Image (cartoon, rainbow, N blue to C red):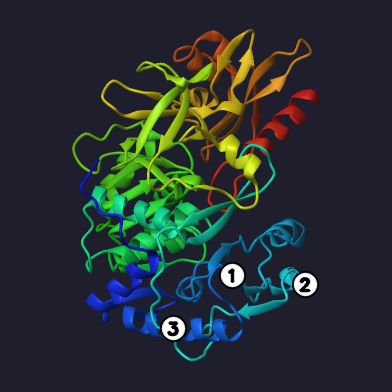
Amino acid sequence: MSDLEYDATLTDFLATAVANFPHRPATFFGGETLSYAELDTRIAAAAGALREMGIRPGDRVALVLPNSPQHLIAFFAVLRLGAVVVEHNPQYTAHELAPLFAHHGARIALVWDQVAAVVDGLASTVIPVSLEAPLPLSGTPVPHRQAALADAALILYTSGTTGQPKGVVLTHGNLAANCIQLEAQADLRPGHERFLATLPMFHSYGLTMSVLLAVRCAAEIILLPAPRPAAVVGALAQRRPTWMPGVPTIYERAMYEQAGEAAADLGGVRYAISGAASLPARIIEPWQDRTGGMLVEGYGLTEASPVLTINPLGEGRRVGTIGKPLADTELRIGDPADLDRSQPDGTPGEILARGPQVFAGYLDNPAATREAFHGEWLRTGDMGVREADGHFRLVGRIKEVIITGGFNVFPSEVEHALLSHPAISQAAVAGVPRADGSEDVAACLVLHPGATFDAEALREHCRGLLARYKVPRHFVVQEELPTDQLGKLRRRQVQDILVAEVSSR
């Protein structure tokens, strides 16, 4: 165990930042800055309005908002009342949102005015929010309220591998612990950091790594409503963030799709963190050369608030791994045949985790909660390997393993081989069913601009890196791969594309 103290809540984070750094910029958005004192004043007034509308401790309030100061103010206003934030993707349709609202039952929803009609009828009170005006909530200011570590703070919906959304309940203690762990790992300097928030706040990765951790260390939060390459490069050049969480596509597009910005000085980013998808090694050196900072990979999942591991931010980092567990976090590789047993180093198995950031359960779903744990260990559903030096390597999702000719093939290892070819920009691998019940390895590809596709040359390249049964038998070239707003690959859609293309040949 470390000597870290997990005794602060998310509302404590804000109160401390306001007390110690009242005039420090808290947010930068659309050319305007709010100090921590100004942010707190607006949060107190918004909390007062929500209280006058009947919100009490334990109630749920839905947010359907893009990254913005209004989103941050609404988030902390709900927490100030002891209520629970329920986050939603503002790009969802009414069809997608309806079952979520029916499940969590929030009476009040604060919704981006551009999509307010989509939420109409799903909550008894829908408050449209413009990003060009202050949050339309102002009541008698509510002072800081002391929450308990065990109090629920946030509900995030995740579909996992089942496709059925589950409400992940995260407490103040879960989320605050993850921030405290990350602050210690990165040696962040209170009152001196600037965070670039390109990832959506409705996702656990974006919320914790870009916003909650920023408040923990009284950082300026540079909020981008969408991670467009030009906006990312502009923020890097003009605002000089020191910390940037992202996904591989954000880093790659910032480096390779902004030819007009090639001369821009992007120095200042001390640490860039990549998650949600495997980080190709080819991105790391250009990024580090351009910014002067480190780009490292980490790993987590919503049920862990979300971060479990990160590569050392200094000596000892290992490219191609997800790093080592955070402080007071334990990971082990379980034997799929008997999860009570741990696999020896170098042998794949299921990643099991425990730590103060791990959630206690899903909202009103005890069966799913039981399935999520093996004893006190969270079952991640991911296959991984522990190396002899303590680093972990992600192999793939358990349910994504391809079985071909009696052999197991992990999509990630085939994707790494494909991405090492100079013509390939993006790759996604899945199994295509065969008549005998086995599967063929198939790959969906995106080419670099100007590259030509030669299937046999690509297979020959893979044969030098992979056993023959792992070499893809089918290739499908696309303009882009299907991803969610975070940039995470939608593997079910990839498989649908591959099955349809292969069956039509």
User: Going from the N terminus, do you reach mark 1 or mark 2 first?
Assistant: 1
User: Going from the N terminus, do you reach mark 2 or mark 3 first?
Assistant: 3
At label 2, counting other C-alpha atoms closer than 10 Å, the crowd grade (few under 14, some 14-19, many 20 or more) is few
Residue 21 percent location from the top left of the image: 24, 76
Residue 495 percent location from the top left of the image: 68, 31
User: Going from the N terminus, do you reach mark 3 or mark 1 first?
Assistant: 3
| Callout 2: SS | loop
What residue sits right under mark 3 in the picture?
A: 44
Gap in angstroms between the C-alphas marked 2 and 3: 28 Å
Between disc 2 and disc 3, the foreground one is 3
Name the one closer to the observer, 77 or 360.
360
| Mark 3 touches mark 1? (CB < 8 Å) | no
- In the displayed structure, 85 sits above or below 371; it is below
Which of the 4 image quadrants contains residue 94? bottom right
Residue 15 percent location from the top left of the image: 32, 74
What residue sits right under mark 1 in the picture?
A: 59
Q: Which quadrant is home to the C terminus?
A: top right
Q: Amino acid at mark 1?
A: Asp
Gap in angstroms between the C-alphas marked 3 and 1: 18 Å
